Image (spheres, rainbow, N blue to C red):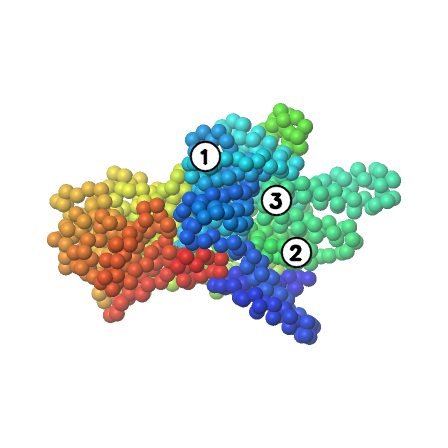
Amino acid sequence: MLSISIAFLAGVLTLQWCAGLPPVWTCAAAIAVLPFLRWKLTRFPAIFIIGFCWAALRAEYALQPVLAQEVEGETVILEGVVHDMPRQLSARRLRFLFAVERLDNGSGWSDFSAKVRLDWYESGFKFRPAPGERWQLAVRLKRPHGFSNPGGFDYERWLFQQGIRATGYIRKDKARNRRLAAGSVSVISHFRNRLMSAFDSLPADRPSMSMIRALTIGDRSAISPSQWDILRATGTSHLMAISGLHISLVAGLVFWIARRVWLRCGNLTEAIPASKGAAVIGLVTALMYALLAGFGIPSRRALIMVSVLTLTIVFDRYSSLFQAIGLAVLVTLLIDPLSVLSAGWWLSFWAVTIIAFIVTGRYGRQGFAQKWVNLHIVLAFAMLPLLLVFFQEASLIAPVANIIAVPWVSLSVVPVALTGTVIFALNETAGELLLQLAGVLLDTVWVLLEWLSRLDYALWRQHEPVAWTLLPAVFGLAVLFMPRGLPGRWTGGVLLLPLFFVTPEGPARGEAHVTLLDVGQGLSAVVQTRYHTLVYDVGPRFNETFDTGQAVVVPFLRHQGIRRLDALVISHGDNDHLGGAASLLSAYPAVEVLSSVPEKVPAARARVCRRGQRWDWDGVRIAVLHPGSGDGLSGNNASCVLRIATEGGQSVLLTGDIERQAEQVLLREQREQLPVDVLVVPHHGSLTSSSRAFIDAIRPDIALFPSGYRNRYGFPKQAIVDRYADIHAATDQTGLSGALTVILTAGPGKPEIQRYRDTVRRYWQPENNH
């Protein structure tokens, strides 16, 4: 079973690396040939093909329907059902999933059966949608789209894996935004909604209640960024997910209680063995817990694993833990082959596999306490490669934190919280008291986690491991965990070293890589030479918890293996250039900062950028061309302008948001420095910039627009794009092609442009992203 599951998984996984889906007829033909092959000789290739084709068919279904391109950005009317409980993201912002049934774009109703993610901006929310209600809504939609950068979160992949086919926001239209019917929901969904309302009414000065909310109903939206920081630093984030740990615990506890009660009932025992009856009761309880938690992907995965174990008890079929894991993998992929796109799927099954390896005799005869300590030490090492691949970070104090937190949360906090949930159904006051007691119990261990998270080097952060280092690392872990006494176990540690010390290949001496990052409607560029790095602008800050410094720039720098930042230039004070500065400076505090508005940069050491400043790094010259000390310009026109050039003469110009007035100053003061190969177009392609005289003086071969996908300003303006086309310059946009990397070489010739979406093209990405 284990080998069959691995072959099936390999087929499913192979599809996820494809840029497009194979025609359905090729899968049908491949499967039709399989019965004519010799099964014993071709079993594993056949299972691989079945896995690949099954994943392809499911993916084809998941990609339907496709939102018509002409509908994007237009106000349309949707009718459908509220899919889940709306989440209050701020005082005037709700977010919820909406199961659309039909759509009217002004030419009549048409079928559009899809799940969409909607934001509703309103002050007051007198009429909050509730799960199961039918609504008519006036909305603006767009196809799934997110930032596309090396090292960044793949939002489009996440939307696809969640089955969300469009995102958008609800227009302010009281006439057309109306509830059509109250609808109906299941008993569990109704109870879940009641419980969520109860959490909303609890005092906001109890941060632990946001985590109790996550442990009971699976809603983690109320957990604050600072709480997540503590959980990540201590390696205890898994405690806030209703997955294998909690569902298995609940099923096991109920099994133990039910079996003891069953044994005391003679008639029941004679009819059905106690173990079988208790196993079924445990499974039903696990199912109820998963439903209460919203039946998300982690809880479904955990329920499948519990079901496999239950069936082995009910049908008296002995199965090793590894065989059970293999069967759970196979069943999970048959139900949802797209689950392999989730980091949680890999982390969950890998953790269970390691635990199975330990409990099946790896450490021989040891006391419980010693086994418990060894378990978490081994898990910390074993999870390291996957954590670095998915998150580029791993907690160094996770064993200490989990040794204490896991039993405390699992054996005290979770039972009390779930008991409070059950009591809440009978008596809301008593239930709320128990839920608050669970919060008090969580507060006791939270103090320890807060202290541990503040320790130096609590969290190890680095670049994403180079692909070829993963296989030696896994083999090295296997060698390290071999039985004691085996000679040469130390070689396993040697095999782990490339995971940490082999970094992504950077520029050679005399070369420079200039990456214009995809930060939406904003600007951020990273200039890399052989041993130095400069960041030019950091993109926008969207709200108190999200900015592109943290979400895009810092992950990119870590992905590139950059541990030290040499300079940060903030061109001017607009949010779309400055907004992510605080997050970047928090991650890289020891950096020289220049800006035209140093007083606005969240760093007291910031200096004013002035014409004549320059860096000569590794055969590459970076010079500030603007502003000059006597220009008397401010705002956009005072933006710091940088020219990057190699000794071979290849060059890039970064212009910030300068407008015509600043362009005239540059033409007068720096005309000889303006001709470049690649121009990052001023002000995102606004009509206020890119005068014909300025373009004629630069005459770039390539013009790059730092503009967001379908941004509200309509940048770049078509008239500006046409101006660059008139001089035969090639154009591109970050909003369409993702991060754009300019490769400047030391020799003659023209720079090379790498488009990130082209390098990571996957079948779920909308075609209009290119």
Determine the image quadrant of residue 296: top right
- Where 637 sits versus 350, above or below? above
**Where in the figure is residue 355, as x and y percent of width and height?**
63, 52
Q: Amino acid at mark 1?
A: Ala
**Where in the figure is residue 294, as x and y percent of width and height?**
60, 42
In whole angstroms, how far apart are the C-alphas of marks 2 and 3?
17 Å
Q: Quadrant of the C terminus?
A: bottom left
**Where in the figure is residue 75, as x and y percent of width and height?**
42, 44
Residue at point 67% right, 43% down? 287
| In-front residue for pair 45/599 | 45
- Residue 265 in view in this figure: yes
- Where 309 sits versus 448, above or below? below
Which residue in the structure is indicated by mark 2?
Answer: 331
Q: Amino acid at mark 2?
A: Val
Q: Amino acid at mark 3?
A: Phe
Q: Secondary structure at mark 2?
A: helix
Which residue in the structure is indicated by mark 1?
Answer: 175
Q: In the image, is 658 to the left or to the right of 280?
A: left
Q: Quadrant of the N terminus?
A: bottom right
Q: In the image, is 642 to the left or to the right of 248?
A: left
How packed mark 3 is, by other alpha carbons closer than 10 Å (few <14, some 14-19, many 20 or more), is some
Q: In the image, is 749 to the left or to the right of 124?
A: left
Q: Are marks 1 and 2 in contact (CB under 8 Å)?
A: no
Eye-nearest disc, 1 or 2: 1
Which residue in the structure is indicated by mark 3?
Answer: 295
Q: Are marks 3 and 1 in contact (CB under 8 Å)?
A: no
Q: Secondary structure at mark 1?
A: loop
- Where 298 sits versus 91, above or below? below
Residue at point 34% right, 58% down? 740
Q: Are marks 2 and 3 in contact (CB under 8 Å)?
A: no
**Where in the figure is residue 135, as x and y percent of width and height?**
53, 38
| In-front residue for pair 568/525 | 525
